Image: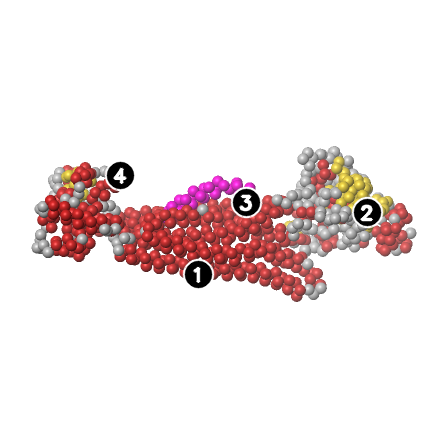
Amino acid sequence: MKRLYPYIKPYWPLILLALGLLYVMASTDLALPDYLSQIINIGIQQNGIDTTIPEVMRASSLDKIALFQSEQERAETLAAYERIEPGTSASAALVPYYPGASLQAVYKRNALDAEAAASLEKALTKPLVILYGFQMMQSNPQQAASFMGPELAAKLKALPAGTDPLSLFSQLPEAQLTQVKLAITQHLNSLDAMMLRQMAVRAVGNEYSVLGVNLQKNQTNYILRIGGRMILMALLAVATSIMVSYLASRTSAGVARDLRAAVFEKVSRFSSAEFNNFTTATLITRTTNDVSQVQQVIFMVIRMAFTAPMIGIGGVIRAIDKSPNMWWLIALAVFILLLFIMLAFALALPKFKVMQSLVDRLNLVIRENLSGLMVVRAFNKQSYEEQRFDKANQEVTGTIRFIGRVMTAMFPIINLVMTGLSVAIIWVGAREVAASTLQVGNLIAFMQYSAQIMFSFMNLSMLFIFIPRAAISGDRIADVLETPIQIQDPAEAKQLPEPVQGKVEFLDVDFRYPGAEMDILHDISFTALPGQVTTLIGSTGSGKSTVVNLIPRFFEVSKGSIQIDGIDIRDLNQHDLRNQIGFVPQKGLLFSGTIDSNMRIGDPTAEEAAVRQAVEIAQAADFVFNESAGLEAEVAQGGTNFSGGQKQRLSIARALVKKPPIYIFDDSFSALDFKTDAALRQALRKHTRNSTVLIVTQRVATAKNSDQILVLDNGRLIGRGTHQELLKSCQTYHEIASSQLSKEELA
């Protein structure tokens, strides 16, 4: 994938923006369980009271608390509160919220910073718990025992009804008072800090209740406040998720678009040498399927790869904060999950590596079968082709099925692990809740965090399965993009002199195909002049088409040079060179669209009259203009709605529209009957009388009226001259002519 980094680099601003949004999304997702925990722990269980420091406290309660404080703690407590007497303006301000303040003196807490609040909470927690224990002694002795210890609770229980234990407690001798304080303190020290805090909160709630505070309303207000924040966080998470998905889609789609364009542009510059390294089927697969794989993984990486670590790490930190004693449950579940995912990875990865090559093979079989359908039917090979397709199809299907089975098996395993984790958390957590070492809200939040952690690890692990597949696809794409182009434009290109004459010279040209051991052209030297028709003739495989394919630089000469108007074609830009050539291949190729759009490939600015003239010269008027659509007649893909001869004539017309100084007809008359061939050549001679014309043919009838005939055999130029000259001087030409012409025509 790193080989494709240049195509990802332009999208880094979008990726960074997505990362910022992902951080916000992860933060909101992690905040939701915490808010739920607060609703349960504080809103439901603590009536909305979230601190052990009372906002307002009766003066009598503060005096009783002072009995269980050190001198320093008493001073700190008194400094943190302001005494308010009943009937004062300050008292009147408190009455709407604390009705009991109208009847007795109270203490109102001053504004505190975080450090002072923490210190005051430490000074008040245990005394509040003791005070609450004494207050509950008469109403709930059993519960009071948990606050004060069983021994002291048993003694206080024996007191007469209506007796204030604290009044008696304050009257004890100093030594006995100290002993009782020590016993209570030792009991409280044995309790869990969380349990102690919950007891202190209950004490604060009791104090508020005595002061007339509506705890139910306080509870409702707290739940609505925290619930509102929770809803806002959820909405923010949804909004950021949508925005991240949009940015991820835009980035991945943009990269895919650029890759497809780059591959297409690169392939369009391939010479025949580069095409030998890639089949058409694999190039199609790499441009479509492979690019889609890369696109999919880029989306997943942006959407998951960054989110998963954030939520996973954040979830672990927050889960441990909620319940430090249950971290091992998450570790065990993650270990089991990763074990199964690694197993799936080991099984699926080898299949991913062969998947793309199997798809290439399938596309190849399909393409060959469709393009050669007439041949298949002609030889009754439908069953053979079906078997060939079925084999390739079964290989792809089997691989996909295996990968699907592995992936499918993962989900029940993941569900099993998740279910097992939930049961284990409830089992262990329930015991801690019963022991008052864990709050119910924290237990629920821990379960939610554990689920987030598991899904994060699962998503991250799944990425490790899909990334190698995309990496393979990325390498296949990079192989195309990094393929060196053998035929390059010169650093400093020359310009053909104006006007271009079109004189073509071959000077001692040798050529061999890339990777071949032997030359297939040897010492080819000739000159094709403007206003003349030069025809290349010879047996099949003699090198005729190779010679003319060297002129537009479809191949590069191995030795010697080819010149146009005295300039080596290697010193010209390929675009400028090919702009001077009207090339007509043996196999007429038309593009989907209309006849007119195909003609204007030669010259997009050509007038309709020029197009019509070219069609008439190419002897195509009989089937073009006899139809009502005329030039606007539809052309199917590949020109399949036209015969071979019609496609050749339209291809010739397309070259004529261009009006270049050099025409190359590579066996372009092979599908024409002799009458049409003769008429076409006669019309061509008039139209191309100022151009250089090179014709490749196997027909002597096509060649005999040429100004110059070149005879090739086994890649060598063995004859040169007119028809009559070659009949006398070239045995090979004489044999070819004798096989095609009658004795009267040879005479």
Mark 3 against mark 2, which lies toward the viewer? 3
Q: Nearer the viewer, residue 619 or 53?
A: 53
Identified at 85% across, 46% down, the residue is: 719
User: In the rendered structure, which segment of residues is drawn in magenta?
Assistant: 1-30
How much space separates mark 2 and mark 4, taking CA atoms? 99 Å
* Residue type pointed to by label 3: Lys
How much space separates mark 3 and mark 4, taking CA atoms? 51 Å
Labelled disc at residue 716? 2
Mark 2 against mark 4, which lies toward the viewer? 4
Mark 4, other Cα within 10 Å: few <14 / some 14–19 / many ≥20: few
Q: Nearer the viewer, residue 339 or 669?
A: 339
> Tags 1 and 3 in contact by the CB under 8 Å rule?
no
Magenta-span inclusion, residue 345: no
* Residue type pointed to by label 1: Pro
Residue 149 location in percent, x, y?
A: 18, 53
Q: Is residue 231 left or right of residue 288?
A: left
Mark 2, other Cα within 10 Å: few <14 / some 14–19 / many ≥20: some
Residue 130 location in percent, x, y?
A: 17, 49
Q: Which residue is mark 1?
A: 412
Mark 1, other Cα within 10 Å: few <14 / some 14–19 / many ≥20: few
For marks 2 and 4 on the same chain, the one whose residue lies earlier in the sequence: 4
Mark 1 against mark 2, which lies toward the viewer? 1
* Residue type pointed to by label 2: Arg
Mark 3, other Cα within 10 Å: few <14 / some 14–19 / many ≥20: few
Mark 3 against mark 4, which lies toward the viewer? 4
How much space separates mark 1 and mark 4, taking CA atoms? 50 Å
Q: Nearer the viewer, residue 174 or 214?
A: 174
Identified at 72% across, 43% down, the residue is: 556
Identified at 46% across, 51% down, the residue is: 460
Residue 71 location in percent, x, y?
A: 17, 39
